[in-house]
Image (tube, rainbow, N blue to C red):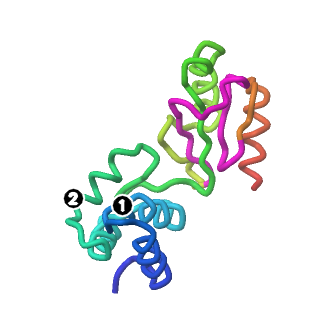
Amino acid sequence: MGVLTEDQKRRIRGYVEKYPRKQAATLPALHLVHDENRTVSNDAIVEIAEILDLHPSEVQDTMTFYAFFKGEGQKNGATRLWVCRGLACMLRGAYELIEHCEHKLGVHCGETTGDGRITLEFAECIGACDGAPACLREDVHVMDVTPEKADALIEELRRA
């Protein structure tokens, strides 16, 4: 028995129909598995490769190119909190904000809190330059983030 559910396999096969080549469905397949499992295990990579008629190393190459995927032995928390460190955010205090969030959460960027609730990460740009420094939680931009606003956001995420 594999690690992917039958529903996940079915949906990955559904992606194949949308592209001219099976290989093009690699990224959507990785997103699907990662979003639902909060990680992409080596076994999942093998199963994705089998569905897409690829070598597992091709799926692994795609996965490791993107920093937002977690692999074997890594797992995202229930919520991911991204702190932007793009140029506009950096000029308005992103590095200090990252340090503040690391201290508040007791983790470094790329790590998950001990309770498994929050993974803190940095992004090179989240497209919210007009509200720098900015954070991204799931699909929501949080703009003009001060240490106090970050504390409130973290408390909200802990309660969610």
Q: Amino acid at mark 2?
A: Ser
Residue 60 appears at what percent x and percent y?
Answer: 28, 56
Query: Which numbered marker is on residue 67?
Result: none
Q: Mark 1, residues whose alpha carbon is within 10 Å: few (<14), some, or many (≥20)?
A: some
**Residue closest to the eye, 110 or 33:** 33
Residue at horizontal 49 percent and vertical 43 percent from the top: 111
Q: Provide the secondary structure element on which disc 2 rests.
A: helix
Residue bearing the label numbered 2: 57
Residue 34 appears at what percent x and percent y?
Answer: 47, 61
Magenta-colored span: 117-140
State the image quarter where residue 78 is shown.
Answer: bottom right
Residue at horizontal 78 percent and vertical 30 percent from the top: 149
For marks 2 and 1, give the one nearer the viewer: 1
**Residue closest to the eye, 12 or 155:** 12
Of mark 2 and mark 1, the one earlier in the sequence is 1
The question of residue 3 being in magenta is answered with no
Residue at horizontal 60 percent and vertical 12 percent from the top: 91
Q: Mark 2, residues whose alpha carbon is within 10 Å: few (<14), some, or many (≥20)?
A: few
Residue 139 appears at what percent x and percent y?
Answer: 67, 49
Q: Is residue 129 above or below residue 10?
A: above
**Image quarter of the N terminus:** bottom left
Query: Which numbered marker is on residue 24?
Result: 1
- Along the horizontal axis of the image, is 101 left or right of 152? left
**Image quarter of the C terminus:** bottom right
